Amino acid sequence: MTEAFALELGGDGVATLLFDLPGRKANIFTRESLAELERRTQELAERRDIRVLLLASAKPDIFIAGADVDEIAGVTEPAAAEAGSRYGQGLFSAWAALPFPTVAAVRGTCLGGGTELSLASTWIVVSDRPDLRMGLPEVQLGIVPGWGGCVRLPRRVGLIAALDMILQGKGVDGRKALAIGLADALLPDAGFAGYAREFARSKIGAPLPRRGPKGLRGVVVDANPVGRAFALKQARKRTLARTHGHYPALLRALDVVGRGLARGEGEGYDAETRAIGELAVSPTTKNLIHVFRLIEQSKKSGADDSAPPPEVRRPAVVGAGVMGGGIAALIADKAGLPVRIKDVRPEALATALGHAGELLDRRVRRRRLRPAEKRRRMALLQPTLEDEGLEACDLVIEAIVENLEVKQGVLADLGRRAPGAVLASNTSSLSIDAIGRSVSGRERVAGMHFFNPVDRMPLVEVVAGPQTSPSAIRTVAAFARRLGKTPVLVRECPGFLVNRLLAFYSAAALWLLDEGYRVEEIDGAMLEWGMPMGPLRLADEVGLDVSAKVAHVLQDAFADRLVFPDWLDRLGAAGRLGVKSGLGVYRYDGRRERGVDPAVYEAIGRPATKRPGADRSALADRLVLPMVNEAARCLEEGVVEGPGPLDLAMIFGTGFPPFRGGLCRWADGVGLAVVVERLEALTATVGKRCLPSDALRRFAGAGGFYAAAT
Ligand code: NAI
């Protein structure tokens, strides 16, 4: 078998251990590569000719991406998970005890076990490339760092910085790593290997570094048990408020870190191992790994296309409103392409440029972007009131008003002007087929449905009308990926996938309001369930006028089962439009929410008759089960390719809680037979809008959504 590590010793006593996992793009700790590292470490411990050892990666963008997720996924017994944690801890302790200093030379991504091995090294140097990330993302998989990270990180960077890294699970760049004391030197990326070697050579015979947080924080928090306890308590409070206790790994990480600091390294390692034993086999971890895999699969899909789509070089956006402005900014920022942005109103163009500038400025302030780079990206935006210049475009994204006749006219015109372009509409409720009706070459018309706010929502629904060609779909999907988005392929239907499912959720919320439940109870139920915001707060965000319009479109399409209360239009009347008008179901001060508007009940003519203290999990059921019911229909109709893409779309398009694994996976976990029963029970009380669909019954008969897909 080809080896993953190669050792080279220079005449000056500087040795380099180069990690290059054969056949893989990333260095990861598989069972085999760990065993090899163990063997190497044992051999190294005997060497007397090495004066300093440099650990480096042969992969251009990755140092070490962490442990093999498949290994974690496959663990079913706590004892096996504990053994895995003990093994890594032992190996990294042996690495830390080598008889010469070690230097981790981190260039590119360094995650999980990679960071833990770096922490076990004497020194860490990092490159200044802006995309470098060094971190401990274990909590994102529902576990805690289990190879000594919970013990070593706080000792190196202090409790507060360590908690930031472990609880957020996000990596830091090189500059931040240096600032918090994680790295000892920030080296230029060009010529990094040479600088790192020079650093290592300078450490031959040098005294060992004195670690630990310095300054006021070091005295008040790290060196003071009362300060530490206070910091841990505060972090716990914040975590509970943020997660409603749905991510047990976060609370365990706090316990483990606290124990390691209070009782010493040995007890810290023991606590880490116990936490891994319990967490690695938990349903939350299995769900989060499921989501991780869905994301990985989605990145890969399309990569093996026999004929890769033609590369987009000259994109244009028509309509510079909220969405079009955001999309054009994204193209300049992420694809680095010049982009024409056309509107009929000069003020719309000015606003769009203003917003793009603000977004980039924010990154400049956070030192994520250099000012010169911001100017370069802004210069890529080419605002225009004219149609000239669209001829040469290969992709035109349409984001004008949501009006079928207007869109048809504009698309037909675009089709004539840009005969070679794929025409992608960002419509949220109109038919792609209808929009493209008068376009010559209808097969090049597709949907490219972004979500608001464009810069933050990771999903793009790539919609195929009955005439859309596979090549147009591939072009749009590949371009969405290039913009950093996750495309999910959807077959045309009213509301496409996400808004269609959300319509059932939102109708259920309005019916609860109709029954006399308070807004706080309805939205609170979903917040506790894990959604980032409640359905009524979401309606305010979308705009109550827009929500009502979409509701009517979908009610017409699914009249047999989707019904909204007849007071729906009253909700969005009299200037009560949601966040944008400062008043909706809630009140707002700018974008800041100021609590439920007590007058909302009067506005809809339905008093809040139910006492506070409703069974929130029953309420959540009433909101989520109708979506499951409709998801079954979507799958059976082939609106989406399977439960995996459906789950990914819901997570990335609505913030559906990842710890539940996705809508279908959650429903499978409850058991579809139970879902059917609960819907039947609801039908008995609220009527046929909750009637389980035949599709759902068939999936239940097949043992679940995922079982039916395999
Ligand atoms: P908007 O009203 O903010 O912007 C529309 C822009 O199109 C305006 O600036 C208008 O001047 C311009 N326009 C109108 N006719 C035009 C023409 N013939 N040529 C060039 N420009 C023209 O609307 P918004 O919210 O940006 O929506 C645009 C599209 O995106 C709609 O189809 C909407 O359904 C869809 N969408 C909206 C979302 C949202 O949350 N706002 C989310 C996803 C999709």
Image (cartoon, grey):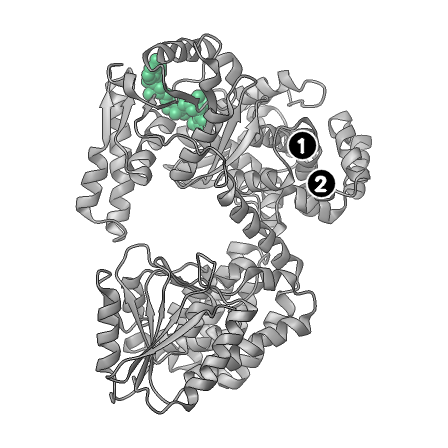
In this view, 290 is above or below 687: below
Residue 318 appearing in the image: yes
User: Percent x, y for residue 533?
Assistant: 53, 42
**Helix, strand or loop status at disc 1:** helix
Residue 577 appearing in the image: no
For residue 635, which numbered disc appears in the image?
1
In this view, 467 is above or below 693: above
Q: Quadrant of ligand 1?
A: top left
Precedes in sequence: disc 1 or disc 2: 1
Residue that mark 2 sits on: 705
**Residue at 55% of width from left, 43% of height from top?**
651
CB of mark 1 within 8 Å of CB of mark 2? yes
Q: Label 2 is placed on what type of residue?
A: Phe
Q: Label 1 is placed on what type of residue?
A: Leu
**Helix, strand or loop status at disc 2:** helix
226 or 60: which is nearer to us?
Answer: 60
In this view, 649 is above or below 167: above
For residue 291, which numbered disc appears in the image?
none
- CA gap between label 1 and label 2 equals 9 Å
Mark 2 Cα shell of 10 Å, populated few (<14), some (14-19), many (≥20): many
